[in-house]
Image: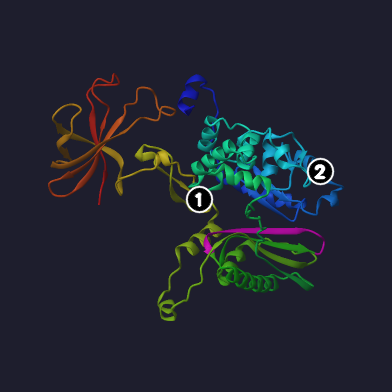
Amino acid sequence: MMLADARALYPGIQTVPADTAGDLHHLEKLALWCQRWGPWTALDPPDGVLVDITAAAHLFGGEVELLADVGQAFAARGLRIRCAIAPTAGAAWALAHFGPDGAILGPSEDSAHRLANLPVAALRLDQDVLTILRRLGLKRLGDLAAIATGPVDHAEAAARDALHRRFRNRKSPSANPLVRLDQLLGKVQEPLLPMAAHHAPLVQRRLMEPIRHRSLLDQVLADLAGDMARELEARGQGARRLELGLWRVDGETIVRGLELAAATREAGHITRLFASRLDDIEAGFGIETVRLRASWTEPLALSQGDVEEASERQGTSLSACIDRLTVRLGPKAVRRPVPRSSHLPERAQTWQPPLEPEPTSQAVLEFHERPLKLLDKPELISVLYASPDGLPQRFRWRGKVCEVARVEGPERIAPEWWREKSTVRLRDYYRIENTEGQRYWIYRHGIAGDGRGGMPQWYLQGLYS
């Protein structure tokens, strides 16, 4: 149901925005972790993982013991699962979703007979295809398999031809039940994309003699920054987050982190930023290992610098300036404007530190045709209109009378009922252009007869370029 209807039935309901990107990231980490049971794994969004256990079950004592180990490992992580083993990915998916928990289908068994009682939804088909199959009376895999691969007589041949004709133009496997059935029975190969682990760039120095002086540590850091720059350049990436680890002789570990406003692989910039983070380092009996790791990287294409342009440019880039200010003044001293999910123009943006991720956008709250300049506070204007709810024809602002040449609107913005009182009036916004070509953004505060005040008032809130 709609969220508004759910809140009307149960006002105390708690809702949070769906984080599909976060769920997919967690599923990717889970797929890499599942490689403990097989040589490679593949994603089955939104909540599945396929594991290839070919020639690996004997390492756990058999397939039954492997499934038991899988259940125990996931239970230890607080996750409830359903798992199955089959010769094909389609059969394993069908058993895991619609068969008994922990089902095992051997390679010598008759897959069509074993899976005959499962519903056609076990073929991983689109919803509209499932509706068509139900209307045709095909509710089980056995019914579909009997038509697709049944005995060749006149009635069966006619039904098979009709089924082929109905789905012959559907190329996607999820839209063609015949292709999915062949994949489930192993007659057609199903391509899968295996997951590959991403190793973060890492460079380190194991020192022959422990160091205790700051000058030597700065030299080691400069060498590591140069190695990291070459490593990132080979991958075509730039670092956004760097972690410097120092291992002392007595076993203590010191970690200093650094986040950058933009991806970079400039060794000198990295060295300068870390310089102020090493002032409070206590070397103790000496530091024997130094490691630099880029835990967050972004693509950064190779670029050829212009020698003459570089010699003329004496300033500092914006991202480097933000990095230096953040390191010296603290992460909360520098702020940037970011959009906020609110229809009201004066609440449409907020300020946050530059290193914090931008809030997720909501398509229903995206803004269109907004002016480039908003007044700090909407200013009251006098408007002449044909009727209380009609379009404005002339208005006076700051002692100047403007004749309206063109009008676009209204765009109605209701008050935020979860924040404002029930007496707050709604707004109707208009884009106005006068006879001189100047454009304004005005709104009518309230409508006549809404029971929330007297006659509506007009305000000017923005100016277009």
Q: What's the residue at 55%, 53% (across, down)? A: 331
Q: What's the residue at 81%, 64% (across, down)? A: 249
On the image, numbered disc 1 is attached to which residue? 353
Q: Is residue 431 left or right of residue 132?
A: left
Per the model, the C-alpha gap separating discs 1 and 2 is 45 Å
Q: Specify the segment rendered in magenta.
A: 249-263
Q: Quadrant of residue 74?
A: top right
Q: What's the residue at 16%, 42% (across, down)? A: 406
Determine the secondary structure under disc 1.
loop
Task: Say if the magenta span includes residue 277.
Answer: no
Looking at this view, is 382 or 135 the one in front? 135
Amino acid at dot 2:
Asp
The coloring applied to the image is rainbow
Structural crowding at the residue carrying mark 2, measured as other residues with C-alpha within 10 Å and reported as few (<14), some (14–19) or many (≥20) = some
- Earlier-in-chain disc, 1 versus 2: 2
On the image, numbered disc 2 is attached to which residue? 69
Q: Residue 35 has which mark?
A: none
Residue extending furthest toward the right: 61
Looking at this view, is 210 or 113 the one in front? 113
| Residue 424: x %, y % from top left | 34, 26
| Residue 371: x %, y % from top left | 29, 46
Task: Say if the magenta span includes residue 261.
Answer: yes
Q: Is residue 120 left or right of residue 95?
A: left
- Reply above or below: 94 against 263: above
